[in-house]
Image (cartoon, rainbow, N blue to C red):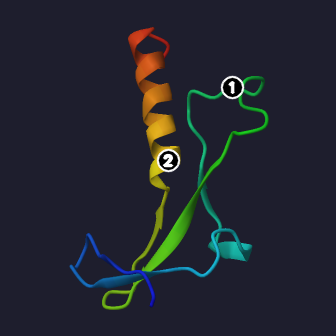
Amino acid sequence: MVETRKCPFCGGRMVPSKVETYGHSTYFWVPPWKSKTTGIFTKAVYGRVWLCLDCGALIPYVNRTKLSILREEFEVLRTEGKV
């Protein structure tokens, strides 16, 4: 059974890509607070792409574990006044 989720744009049904990183379907985001020295090994955050079968939207989503790590990292830097 294929995992599905609701499309935030049209409310249709979305299905995930079979792989997370492949060719041009690789979507990534680089945290703006990472420097070249501190983020040399883990700069990019990769998202798994989901396709809406109704409107055709392609949306990359980051898994919950990575998202919570990024949120915590951002909050710490924000309280320190670095972002």
Between label 2 and label 1, give the one nearer the viewer.
Answer: 2
Q: Give the secondary structure at mark 1.
A: loop
Q: Give the residue at the far front of this rendering.
A: 1
Residue 80 sits above or below residue 60 on the image: above
**Mark 2, residues whose alpha carbon is within 10 Å: few (<14), some, or many (≥20)?**
few
Count of numbered marks: 2
Residue 40 at x, y percent in the picture: 78, 33
Cα gap from disc 2 to disc 1, whole angstroms: 22 Å
Residue 74 badge: none
Mark carried by residue 35: 1
Residue at the spot of label 2 = 65
Q: Amino acid at mark 2?
A: Thr
Q: What amino acid does circle 1 point to?
A: Ser
Q: Nearer the viewer, residue 5 or 79?
A: 5
At which x and y percent is residue 48? 55, 67
Name the image quarter holding the N terminus.
Answer: bottom left
Q: Residue at x 50, y 36 (%)?
A: 70
In-image side of 76 versus 25 (left or right): left
Instruction: Name the quadrant containing residue 41.
Output: top right
The answer to whether 34 appears left or right of 10 in the picture is right
Say left or right for 57 vs 49: left
Q: Is residue 47 depicted above or below 79 in this figure?
A: below
Quadrant position of residue 42: top right
Q: Vertical placement of 57 versus 70: above or below?
A: below
Q: Of callouts 2 and 1, which one flags the residue occurring earlier in the amino acid sequence?
A: 1
